Image (cartoon, helix red, strand yellow):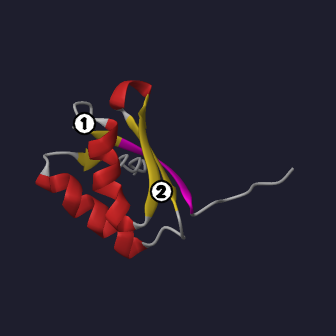
Amino acid sequence: KKLMVSLRSLLLPVSGLDTQTPDQLLALVKPLGASSAELLDGGKLLQITMKSDWTFERAAKLQKSLQNINAKVLVPEEPKLAQ
């Protein structure tokens, strides 16, 4: 079995983007080097296709852009280890 990882195709859990139009989503991610963006699963997932690899710098810029419109990428909590 093989696992392939692409840094040009992203699927991010998000909140606060469900009212954004497709044009607004593209305008949000295009400055990051994206060629397309789409909301899936009732606005809970943001699918982004990049022209070049996704980086930590681009992730930080996306977080800042999302904060400006009261949206965010959801980060799952780490499970707590039993003591």
Q: In the image, residue 5 lies at what x, y percent? A: 66, 59
Query: How many dots with numbers?
Result: 2
Q: Which residue is mark 2?
A: 35
Q: Is residue 81 left or right of residue 70?
A: right
Query: Which residue is situated farthest in the right direction here?
Result: 1
Secondary structure at numbered mark 2: strand
Query: Which residue is situated farthest in the top direction here?
Result: 42
Res. 39 image quadrant: top left
Question: Residue at 20% across / 45% down in the picture?
Answer: 71
Secondary structure at numbered mark 1: loop
Question: Residue at 36% across / 33% down in the picture?
Answer: 44
The part of the chain drawn in magenta is: 8-13
Identify the mark nearer the N-term, 2 or 1.
Answer: 1
Q: In the image, residue 50 lies at what x, y percent? A: 51, 61
Q: In the image, which disc is placed on residue 20?
A: 1
Q: Is residue 83 left or right of residue 71?
A: right
Query: Which residue is situated farthest in the bottom direction here?
Result: 57
